[in-house]
Structures are given as C-alpha cells and as structure tokens.
Amino acid sequence: MAQRNTLKYIILGLINERPVTGYELTKAFDSDIGEFWLAQHSQIYPLLKRMEHDQLITHQLEVTGEKLERKRYAITPDGQQELADWLNEPVTKLNANKDEFILKLYFIRDRQDGRLLPMLTTQLQLHQQKRNHLQDQMAQKFPDAAHIEAYGHFLILQHAISREQDYCQWLTNTISNLTA
Amino acid sequence: MAQRNTLKYIILGLINERPVTGYELTKAFDSDIGEFWLAQHSQIYPLLKRMEHDQLITHQLEVTGEKLERKRYAITPDGQQELADWLNEPVTKLNANKDEFILKLYFIRDRQDGRLLPMLTTQLQLHQQKRNHLQDQMAQKFPDAAHIEAYGHFLILQHAISREQDYCQWLTNTISNLTA
DNA sequence: GGTATCATGTAAATGGTTACATGATTAC
DNA sequence: GTAATCATGTAACCATTTACATGATACC
C-alpha cells in the first residue's frame, strides 16, 4: 500500500455535480478547490482513464467545430457509492499543513536577524493578496447571503478567508512587535 | 526535474543547531516542526546517506553500551552554504494547504444534510485537542516571555496556536449557526 | 523475564511535479 | 495571421507512505 488517493474522491465529487471534461477538472484547481488541493492535467488525464477502467465513471465524446474532441465524464452508480463511502468515513486525524515560509522562520533563532523583517513583509503581501482574492470570490459567488445553494462551498470559502485574515493579523502583529 | 526536496533543508537546519542522529531527526517530526512538515524514518535515513555523499553533512559513530551504534551527523561548510541559500531565497508563492475535512465539506451542498453536524463536531474536537497541545508546548518551551532564545520557533508556535484558535472559532460559529 | 524505547536500515508501491508533445478553435 | 485558449495526452523523475526487517538497551 502507499498513499491514499484523495484526488480520486475530489474528481468523483466534481463529476457528481455535473458531467465534466478533463480540461474543466483541471480548471477547477485554479480556483475554489485549489485552495485546499492542487493537481495538474498530467495527473488528471491518466487518473480519469484508470477510474473509467474501474467503472467509477464513463465518458461520451463531444465534438466542437470540425475536429476538436473532448470527453465528457459522468459518474456511475459504483462511483456514487465510492464517493458516499468517502464522505461518510470520518476524518480522524489532521495532517501537517506544509508551509515553506514557516519552516524557514523556524530556523531564524535571533530576533535581531536581518532576514526576519523582509521575510515577514513579503509574506504579508502574499497573504493580503490571497485574502483579497478570496473576498472577491465570496462577493461574486455568494452575493445573496440569504440564498445559499452550495452550502459546503460557502463554508470553505468563509473558512479560507478567516484563515488568511488570521495569518495577516499574526504577520502584522509580529512586524510591529519587531519594529517597535 | 520533479519536486523540490524541502526535507533536505529541514534536516540541514536541524543539524546546523547541533549534531544529531537519524533517530533524533525522526523524533523532531513528532512535535515542533511536525506541525508544518512530516517525515518518516524510512525517508530520513536514505536521505542522510545521500546528503553525506553530496558532502553536505558528515557523521561520527557513537557506541552506547556494548554494541549499539548510532551515527551523529554534523553539518559541513557546503551544507551551511546550502542552508543559507535556501533561507535567503524568498518564498514567492503559497501552496495549497491540504485538508481532507474541508474537501469533504465542499461536496455537501445542502445545509440540511445530516452528515454536516457530526462532521463539524468531530472536527472541532480534533482541533481543540491540537490547540490545547500547542498551548501546553508553548507554556513548556517558552515559560519566560521576556527571554526568548529560539525566536523563530516561538513565532511559529504562536502562529500555530492562533491558526487552531481561528479554526475552532469558525467551527463553533458554523455549528451554532446550524443548530439555531 | 518482558515491555517500551533506542537505533538503523531496505523494499514496494503510489502520489505528484515538471517537461515534452501535438493539434484545433476563437478572437483580435 | 497570430496569439490566447481549448483540449488531451505521455515520459521522466522524485517525494512520500506503508510495510518488512533486525537487533540492542533500559526499566520495571
């Protein structure tokens, strides 16, 4: 055995909403879900093939214009079962969230270290950008707070914003503490 | 090319503080740094061998009791250079922080979905435990707020606590919003 | 004497990234 | 016509996990 194929479940979840192409799946990781998982098309296409072989999904060919083909994948009953099993299986442990900036910080022992301030300010910019982006997404996708369709999507967006807010706050506090 | 070997730099950073054994390195991922990166001994021992071959580290044999040997690794000038280069190289992008619970949540569309509440409460327990653990660590490792030696270590612990605090807050709010 | 921990390795399998590769369609 | 985007794939390489394997030492 080796690692658990989480990507498979993400793909099942996305296809379960509506039939999609590999290209559309790839795009999904640029936004939304990309906050919490990443995947390139080179990982997605072969996995789709394998999942079809395992009868979790099927595809139909579509043609755009003269020749350009695309495969639109739909979920099978087996696929739906596997998705449901995954959703019902409780998450019993938290995995480390990998953060290269934090790792570097760990090795800065001295409060006076000249690298500290530039590291912190660069990082603050990145997280502020991300926070702004997420807030734009929220405004765009959930303009009406009273009528929320995709509730889970709303929740994770809210969580991501809160997380970035907290990250910025910590960085800001640390910077002002250093420069005081 | 493929993935960037971040573990190498973590190991260099740890060995740079003081000479350590593979066993001690493995233990380091159970606490402290384990918040932000994980590694098993099966990954560490071969990498140590490779790093020694690349002349980033060297080792000396120590013997405990009659026979039990251990290799205590020290950093070389090349290793120190490589560590410094890594630390100086700015972190210009944020990577997705993988969170399986959040992914599952994404696929729950309906606010009335019966799976929602148990998922949230289980997750709250996990994050509360983690927060408590981190607060214990803080009290233990940094009892005197005025005299902080390992400043980076202090900062990342502070950050981890703040992050878990925020996670718990979001879960608590979401739960009370659901049950209202 | 037994159990937990110290201590170091290897093997097999899979996950994931980067690069290579090709061609069609759309919009300017 | 040309650049951006749509669309799908493969190859090579490395990271990471899980399992297999062995023996010593410390503590009760």
Image (spheres, coloured by chain):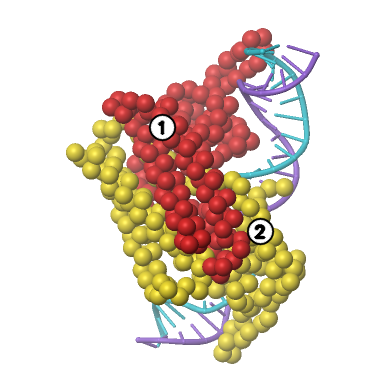
Chain colours: A yellow, B red, C purple, D cyan
Q: For mark 1, what is the residue? A: B138
Residue B17 in which image quadrant: top left
In terms of secondary structure, where does tag 2 sit?
Answer: helix
Relative depth, front residue between A3 and B79:
A3
In this rendering, the answer to whether A147 lies above or below D21 is below
Amino acid under disc 2: Asn
Relative depth, front residue between A115 and A86:
A86
Q: Is residue B26 visible?
A: yes
Residue C16 image position (x, y, % from top left)? 56, 55
Q: In the image, what residue occupies the spot 54% across and 18% down?
A: B60
Residue A131 image position (x, y, % from top left)? 35, 60
Q: On the rendered image, what quadrant is the C terminus of chain A found in?
A: top left
Amino acid under disc 1: Met
**Marked residue chain, label 1:** B
Q: For mark 2, what is the residue? A: A88
In this rendering, the answer to whether A156 lies above or below A57 is above
In this rendering, the answer to whether A21 lies above or below A8 is below
Q: In the image, what residue occupies the spot 46% across and 49% down?
A: B168
In terms of secondary structure, where does tag 1 sit?
Answer: helix
Q: Is residue A28 visible?
A: no
- The residue sitting at the front extreme is B180
**Marked residue chain, label 2:** A
B122 horizontally vs D22: left or right:
left
| Mark seen at residue A19 | none
B49 horizontally vs A60: left or right:
left
